[in-house]
Image (cartoon, rainbow, N blue to C red):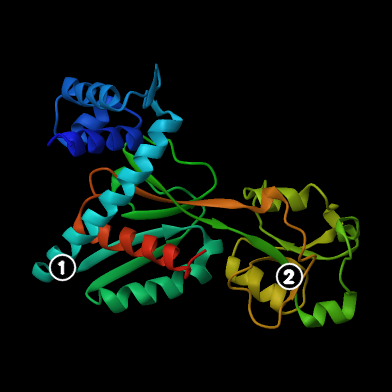
Amino acid sequence: MRLNFWTEIRTAWCVAELRNITRAAKQLGMHHSSVIRHIDALETELGVKLFQRHSRGYTPTEAGEELLRTASSVDEQLLNLRARIEHSQVQISGRLVLTSVPSLDFTIMPMIARYQRQYPQVEVVYVADPRNFELSLGEAHVALRAGPRSTTPDDIVTPAWDFFPGLYASPAYAERFGLPRNVNELVHHRFIVGNEPAPLAPFTKWLHARLPQSALVLRTSQMSAQYAAIQSGVGIGFLSTRVAPPGMVPVLPDLTPPEWKVQIWMVTHVDLHRSPKVQSLTRFIQQEVKSGRIK
């Protein structure tokens, strides 16, 4: 293998992340023409086209995606090695702001507890809010977002995990009102939903499209209040299938519409992405997902 072969692969991987030659050159500290030369040399070496060039940027081909998955894995191992070396020399500490959508609170909090056992000097500021925080303005260091992939310039976006909610009722609700046996019977039941002017989550849109307004008996923008209302027997509502409280009754457990699957993305800003403190959290979240503790 040529000595600069891995350098060219890392260049291509950076372009694939940022979808832009100029931003990749800035992050790598290289000249614009050097980035293009690395990609051309790599494509010649492998004999395949790694990117589709168009006016909006560079998009990886199928061959490019395969190469970059491997490169990402190798890069992660190298970063882990570097982090272990740095950790022995530098104490990671200070304030770290993590944002997420409120529906992930019960998943994120145990993860933060495990993270702080490993990094006890880090003060985590956790903000649960459906809005997208401006990472470029320093509003947050790491964001866990649901839905479409961020297209904001200078965002580094990594798929984290898939979130699967389910409909649940309390035993008290089931005893008093019974449970629907199929989708058509949902209209005869009571539901707890958010208080947004229009539903944002795809699974909530799915529910609203099938229910009359009379079935929506409680609206609240607070996820903790929604969970408490479901547990109290006020109505049926969505809970994470992973962290639903013991004793809650699944409603139509075999129902798994594709609209209920939500992609969770981990987002950082290009200027902070490689900092030891941010890397300590992003690597930890990736390890949590791989181990099955988050899903």
- Considering only vertical position in the picture, is 291 above or below 145? below
Farthest residue in the front direction? 1
Residue corresponding to mark 2: 168
Residue nearest the viewer, comparing 115 with 78: 78
Please name the residue shown 31% across and 60% down the image.
283
CA–CA distance between discs 1 and 2?
43 Å
Q: Is residue 246 left or right of residue 82?
A: right
Classify 10 Å Cα crowding around label 1: few (below 14), some (14-19), many (20 and above).
some
Q: Is residue 143 left or right of residue 147?
A: left
x%, y% of residue 24? 25, 32
Please name the residue shown 33% across and 52% down the image.
139
Residue nearest the viewer, comparing 289 with 212: 289
In the rendered image, which quarter is residue 11 located in? top left
Amino acid type, callout 2: Tyr
- Considering only vertical position in the picture, is 292 above or below 26? below
x%, y% of residue 86? 13, 63
Disc ID at residue 281: none
x%, y% of residue 154? 31, 37
Q: In terms of sequence position, does the residue under pointer 1 or pointer 2 come before the other?
A: 1
Please name the residue shown 21% across and 67% down the image.
94
- Considering only vertical position in the picture, is 267 above or below 222? above
x%, y% of residue 87? 15, 68
In the rendered image, which quarter is residue 238 located in? bottom right
Q: How many marks?
A: 2
Amino acid type, callout 1: His
Q: Split into 4 quadrants, where in the image is the N terminus? A: top left
Residue corresponding to mark 1: 87
Q: Mark 1 or mark 2, which is nearer to you? A: 1
Helix, strand or loop at disc 1?
Answer: helix
- Considering only vertical position in the picture, is 92 above or below 199? below
